[in-house]
Image (spheres, grey):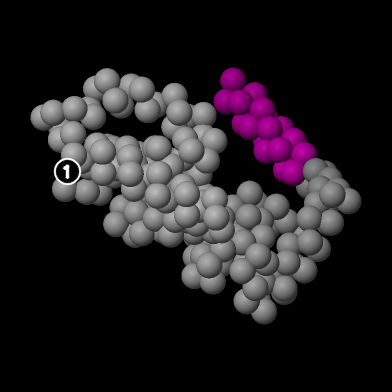
Amino acid sequence: MKLFLSALVCLVIITVGYSEAAAPVKKESPAQIAAKKNFEAVKSEAAKGGAEKLRELADLYYAGKGVGRDYTEAYKAYLASAEKGDVLSEATVAWMLRNGQGASKDYKKSLEWYTKAAEKGHVESQLGLAELYYNSVGLPKRDYPTAYKWYLIASGLGSKDAKAFLPRMVQSVLKEPHVEPEQKAAAEKTAQDWLAAYTKK
């Protein structure tokens, strides 16, 4: 019996060793080769410091196209692009900081980047900002009037999500003791003024 088991173990070791040795080396597909070449080209262009190319490089790192997925490198490239004023990168940096992706969670910085992108008319950032104020994420307390203002602005720019959420907000929190009538009116006026100024740009 022992002899049989020893023979069986040897057979398994030989078979495994043979199958590993005989395993064919995987060849890269033409698409993989093209993706790697594209990544290297974009990386080379991004080194020149253009905001759009930095964002494009960040997108490739984030998605793992032509390179291994790397959220840390993606964050660095998005941040470099955001610091040059690219609104999509500003929004992405805010989202990554909020979720701790590629960088440590930092709600204060997330709020700052969301605000920069929101002020430029980026609707998803306006929603993100409104949500942070509404749920007091990284804030000492909920700020319903400011959340309301940003939901109004996002709705004014066509956001269906903001439009759908506003009636619920009006019914539940936009009344005393949560919000004074003057605060609600001030938020509405600020949103109207913002939208009027934005449409003139």
Q: Is residue 166 above or below residue 183?
A: above
Task: Let me know if residue 96 appears in the view.
Answer: no
Q: Quadrant of the N terminus?
A: top right
| Residue 66 point in image, percent of width and height | 73, 56
Task: Let me know if residue 180 appears in the view.
Answer: yes
- The residue furthest right is 30
Helix, strand or loop status at disc 1: loop
Residue identified by numbered label 1: 141
Image point (33%, 22%), residue name: 168
* Res 109 → quadrant: bottom left
- The residue furthest bottom is 48
Residue 6 magenta-drawn? yes
Residue range of the region highlighted in magenta in the rendering: 1-20
Q: Could you say which is closer to the camera, residue 198 or residue 59? A: 198
| Residue 111 point in image, percent of width and height | 34, 54
38 left or right of 149 in image: right
